[in-house]
Image: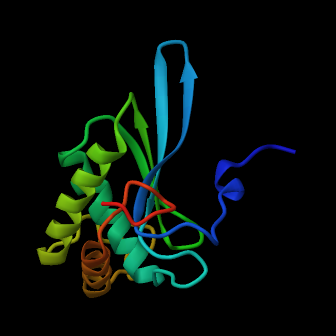
Amino acid sequence: MARVESFELDHNTVKAPYVRLAGTEKNGEALIEKYDLRFLQPNEDELPTAAVHTLEHLLAVNLRDHLESIIDISPMGCRTGFYMIMWNEHSPKEIRDALVKVLTFIAETDFVPAVSAKECGNYKDHSLFSAQEYAKIVLEKGISLDPFERVM
């Protein structure tokens, strides 16, 4: 059976919000990193679909203004956060600092990118208000660099 890193994480013991390097892959000189950007406590809360969808759009555009080499940002199926895939080596602190800047921006913005039928496959399912409320919740709790301790 294939190993899936996120299925081996004890979701009962993590303490969200946090940023965690969840895996690396190397092929010759190419290094790819996967980050777990956990917003909400697993098995206790989840992002509503309209909030997660809007956060996905806002993170996808705005994190690229602060971090180079992003390949993709995708919501977790459990709707407690996002995975971010990147080229090259980064530090969790670098990722957290950028995420704080972007969540602060999200809490204050009045614009969501790519929300027309042409640009988005489910353009009717967005909520800027909800995305902003969850961004504020994450910022108020603080984003830890340790998934098992509340360390900022």
Residue extending furthest right? Answer: 1
Residue 128 vertical position relative to residue 8 in the rendered view, above or below: below
Query: In which quadrant is the C terminus drawn?
Result: bottom left
**Image quarter of residue 142:** bottom left
Q: Is 39 placed left or right of 97 in the picture?
A: right
* 81 or 93, nearer to the observer: 93
Residue 32 visible in the shown view = yes
Residue drawn at (26%, 36%) of the image: 68
Residue 50 in percent (x, y) is at: 41, 82
* 4 or 48, nearer to the observer: 4
Residue drawn at (45%, 75%) of the image: 40
Q: How many marks?
A: 0
Residue 22 vertical position relative to residue 89 in the rendered view, above or below: below
Q: How is the image coloured?
A: rainbow
Residue 125 visible in the shown view = no
Residue drawn at (41%, 70%) of the image: 39
Residue 81 in percent (x, y) is at: 46, 67
* 30 or 16, nearer to the observer: 16
Residue 68 vertical position relative to residue 100 in the rendered view, above or below: above
Query: In which quadrant is the N terminus drawn?
Result: top right
Residue 18 in percent (x, y) is at: 41, 62
